[in-house]
Image (cartoon, rainbow, N blue to C red):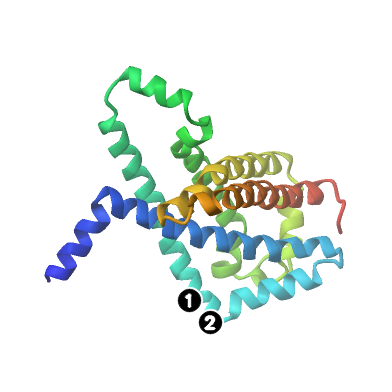
Amino acid sequence: MNGMNWFGKFLTSSIGRKFVMGLTGIALVLFLIVHCGINALIFVNDGGVLFNEAAHFMGTNIIIRTMEIGLFVGILLHIVQAYMLAVANSKARPGKYQVNSANANSRWYSRSMTLLGTLILLFLIIHLKHFWVVSRFTGLEETSYGAGNLYIEMQEVFAIGWVVIVYLIGVISLAWHLLHGFQSAFQTFGWNTLKYRGLIKCAGKVYAILIPLLFALMPVAMYFEWIK
């Protein structure tokens, strides 16, 4: 019981919240690499054959489906802890002079993580509705897209101009979020040392540009029919 009390206090403490944020942040960084890699298979331009095979494997493999549950728990923890940290930081803010001083010494996106996170959350809800809910619960075989054909579903969804714009806004928000979040996750665990700081900073910038850029190219390529 004492152990559980200690663990509960740790999770609700400032250090514990940052630890959870860092851990779930790194997990999400790894997930985005896998997710982006699979989605990028549409650029093979084979009519979605390879992409659909990969999507089918991810949707039917029991190990992947189990990890999917853990991922959703991690996302929820990341969101909850982010808002709790934002509220705690807001209450602890001493005054206008200190706020102005902090603004002069930090990037705007590092001060706007809550706003960017909210935009990403709204984008995530739309994204899950378009693809994950349909493929996991309604069954693509019951729709006009064809039997398990997520590629055709992407073509249908991204043929709508306003949807593409919403996705681009979400991806841009993700890029700014990652510019700060990538390095912050490593810093939480003390890995952002002087020896590796330059490498982590460089890797963070490359990651924050490359991954969102690939995600942005997908709806744009579908909309303009660069791939079929």
What numbered label is drawn on residue 66?
Answer: 1
Q: Is residue 117 above or below residue 226?
A: above
Q: Among all residues in the image, which is located at the extreme bottom?
A: 62
List x then y, in percent, for residue 23.
42, 60
Q: Is residue 169 above or below residue 211?
A: above
List x then y, in percent, for residue 44.
84, 65
Q: Among all residues in the image, which is located at the extreme left?
A: 2
Helix, strand or loop at label 2? It is: helix
Q: Are marks 1 and 2 in contact (CB under 8 Å)?
A: yes
Q: How many marks?
A: 2
Image quadrant assignment for residue 139: bottom right
Which residue was labeled with disc 2?
A: 62
Depth check: 145 or 24 in front? 24
Depth check: 222 or 171 in front? 171
Residue located at (61% from left, 52% from top)? 199
Residue located at (27% from left, 25% from top)? 94
Tell me the quarter of the image containing the C terminus: bottom right
